[in-house]
Amino acid sequence: MDIHMSDIMLHIDEDLNQKEQLILESQMRDQTGVIGLGYHGTQPHLMIVEYDRDATSPKTLLHAVNNYGLHAELVGFL
């Protein structure tokens, strides 16, 4: 079975401390189709998500962040 990987960048509006980032990261890893993710090294409000585009969508991933009570926008595709 082939995995069709894509990457997106999300802008998280809130300033998250390291613990909050780890919690969000853990919650996002539980989303169907998420392969990997991390934060931009010098801009920690930017989250990069690698996902299987056959299993989920950017809209679904954005809604997942919003459902955790955070405000985020899709910056773009990588």
Image (cartoon, rainbow, N blue to C red):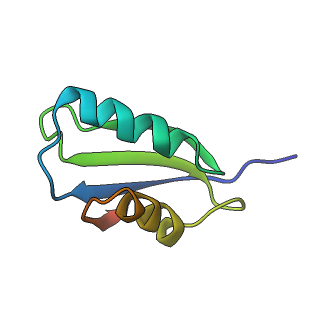
Look at the picture and state if 77 lies above or below 44: below
In the current view of this chain or complex, which residue is farthest to the right?
1
Residue 39 visible at all = yes
Quadrant location of residue 76? bottom left
Q: Quadrant of the C terminus?
A: bottom left
Who is closer to the viewer here, 31 or 36?
31
Instruction: Compare residues 24 and 62 and report the one nearer the observer.
Output: 24
Place residue 37 in its image quadrant. top left
Residue 75 position in % (x across, y down): 28, 65
Relative to 68, say whether 73 is above or below: below
Residue occupying the point 20% across, 31% down:
41
Horizontal side of 51 relative to 48 (left or right) equals right
Position of residue 40 measured from the top left corner of the image (x, y, whole percent): 24, 38
Q: Position of residue 73 (x, y in %)?
A: 28, 68
Residue 78 visible in rendering: no
The residue under the point 74% across, 48% down is: 3
- Single out the residue that lies furthest toward the bottom: 59
Residue 33 at what x, y percent from top left? 65, 50
Classify 72 as above or below 45.
below
**Relative horizontal placement of residue 4, taking residue 2 as reference (left or right):** left
* Residue drawn 41% across the image and 65% down it: 62
